[in-house]
Image (tube, rainbow, N blue to C red):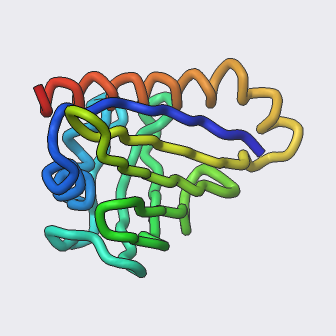
Amino acid sequence: MYQLKRTQFIPTDLQTCWDYFSSPLNLKEITPPSMGFIVKSEVPQKMYEGLMISYTVKPLAGIPMNWVTEIKTVKDLEFFVDEQRVGPYKIWHHEHHFKAVDGGVEMTDIVTYVLPLGILGRLVHPFLVRPKLEQIFAYRFQKVDAIFK
């Protein structure tokens, strides 16, 4: 099992931050274009527990892959959790935490994941999977920074 944790300061109020991140309509904006991210299902303006969202992504070599996530838990203005139901990972559990701090919001992402394919998955993790996740979250960090300036 692997974990990626990122914390970002966002210079806005908690409600504005929450409204942006709790809308599935904004996910494409903070996803690298190279991922070929397309939302396939109809999504509401605001997420809710049990919401299933279907996407197509191209995480490696431009090969399209179906990804379905479920919004598992939502605690308004504090956190939400999405979990993969169909996709490239054996387990994908993504926590999004929000905390009001002086001058803005501290947002923390915690992604816990397990790769498929046993030892093969473990072998490709350090030079293929982890760098790709780092790249995705670095892009997201820059986009969020630009959006909330």
Q: Residue at x 13, y 32 (%)?
A: 147
Q: Residue at x 26, y 38 (%)?
A: 30
Q: Nearer the viewer, residue 147 or 31?
A: 147
Above or below, comparing residue 22 to residue 30 in the picture: below
From the top left corner, tell me how far across and down residue 69 is, in percent: 45, 65
From the top left corner, tell me how far across and down residue 135 is, in percent: 45, 23
From the top left corner, tell me how far across and down residue 130 is, in percent: 62, 27
Q: Is residue 67 left or right of residue 101?
A: right
From the top left corner, tell me how far across and down residue 116 is, in percent: 74, 49
Above or below, comparing residue 108 to residue 93 in the picture: above
Rendering quarter of residue 103: top left
Q: Is residue 5 left or right of residue 126?
A: left
Rendering quarter of residue 45: bottom left
Q: Is residue 149 left or right of residue 115?
A: left
Q: Is residue 95 left or right of residue 148?
A: right
Residue, far front: 102
| Image quarter (top left, top right, bottom left or bottom right) of the C terminus | top left
Q: Residue at x 23, y 55 (%)?
A: 18
| Image quarter (top left, top right, bottom left or bottom right) of the N terminus | top right
